[in-house]
Image (cartoon, coloured by chain):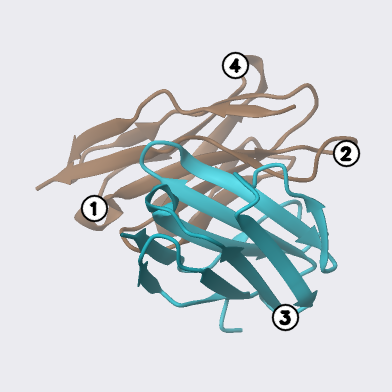
Chain colours: A cyan, B brown
């Protein structure tokens, strides 16, 4: 298996622009997680899905953030409009509900908002 | 709810020296415990995990960790550190039955290795 795939790996955009981050989980995994990592706040869970259904989005910082999972093999995290404080590394992770919470992480998307 | 504390933000060791990274957790029942490693510019990779049984668990890259229920700790150890071990290390605790499925991560410990 190729592991969790994220795209793009790097994104540089200007304030006010829409940003879409993409994730392909490991085939067969039924949980998908979006995290944000910054120096100041560490690793923060933004939202997670189970069987394509959003379960908990309490970590989403603002209404500017939205996430979707239209099918078992694809998810997006969208920021609209983007702001400089959104600059961070965004990770997607997936897991099997039967594997005792072990998560497999993608390589991350480094987002820079100018 | 569970919580994790990694009291050391940075640890500096010399290559070849032994290493111990501390992790303390808070959870009312038997936890599932993990250590992940993040190399620069990469995602997190699982080093080892504890679910039950032998409290000393072996992981990849020569790492081991010991679960001590009485101390609510799950410290990571390595007898001899290599320069390639320089990375960020995260401890995580996942709830067992009856709790939230989602693991909670600590803030991480940055390991610096001197030649």
Residue under the point 34% across and 58% down: B39
Whether label 2 touches label 3, CB < 8 Å: no
Disc 4 or 1, which lies upstream in sequence? 4
Residue sitting at the far top: B70
Along the line of sight, the residue nearer the viewer: B70 or B38: B38
Q: Is residue A74 visible?
A: yes
Residue corresponding to mark 1: B82
**Residue B107 percent location from the top left of the image:** 46, 35
Q: Give the Cα separation between the discs numbered 4 and 1.
A: 29 Å
Label 2 marks a residue whose chain is B
Residue corresponding to mark 2: B97
- Same chain assignment for discs 3 and 4: no
**Residue A31 percent location from the top left of the image:** 76, 62
Q: Tell me the number on the disc at residue B71.
A: 4
Residue under the point 25% across and 58% down: B84
**Residue A5 percent location from the top left of the image:** 55, 77
Label 1 marks a residue whose chain is B
Q: Give the Cα separation between the discs numbered 3 and 1.
A: 38 Å
Q: Give the Cα separation between the discs numbered 3 and 4.
A: 41 Å
Residue sitting at the far right: B98
Which SS class for mark 2?
A: loop
Which SS class for mark 4?
A: helix
Residue corresponding to mark 3: A73
Of tags 3 and 1, the one toward the viewer is 3
Residue under the point 61% across and 56% down: A65
Along the line of sight, the residue nearer the viewer: A104 or A9: A9
Q: Give the Cα separation between the discs numbered 2 and 1.
A: 38 Å
Which SS class for mark 1?
A: loop
Q: Please, is residue B65 above or below residue B70 in the view?
A: below
Q: In which quadrant is the N terminus of chain B drawn?
A: top right
Q: Tell me the number on the disc at residue A42.
A: none
């Amino acid at each position: 298996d190729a592991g969790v795939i994220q795209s793009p790996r790097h994104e540089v955009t200007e304030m006010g622009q829409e940003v879409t981050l993409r994730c392909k989980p490991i085939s067969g995994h039924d949980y998908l997680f979006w995290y944000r990592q910054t120096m100041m706040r560490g690793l923060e869970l933004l939202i997670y899905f189970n069987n394509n259904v959003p379960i908990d989005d309490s970590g989403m910082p603002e209404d500017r953030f939205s996430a979707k999972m239209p099918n078992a093999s694809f998810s997006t995290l969208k920021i609209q409009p983007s702001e400089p404080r959104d600059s961070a590394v965004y990770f997607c992770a997936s897991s099997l509900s039967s594997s005792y919470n072990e998560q497999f992480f993608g390589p991350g998307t480094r987002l820079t908002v100018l | 709810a569970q919580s994790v504390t990694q009291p050391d933000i940075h640890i500096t060791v010399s290559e070849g020296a032994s290493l111990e990274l501390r992790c303390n957790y808070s959870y009312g029942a038997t936890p599932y415990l993990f250590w992940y490693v993040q190399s620069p510019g990469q995602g997190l990779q699982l080093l080892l995990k504890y679910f039950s049984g032998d409290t000393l668990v072996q992981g990849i890259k020569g790492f081991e960790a010991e679960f001590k229920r009485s101390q609510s700790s799950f410290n990571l150890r390595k007898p001899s550190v290599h320069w390639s071990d320089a990375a960020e290390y995260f401890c995580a605790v996942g709830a067992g039955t009856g709790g939230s499925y989602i693991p909670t991560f600590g803030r991480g410990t940055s390991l610096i290795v001197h030649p």
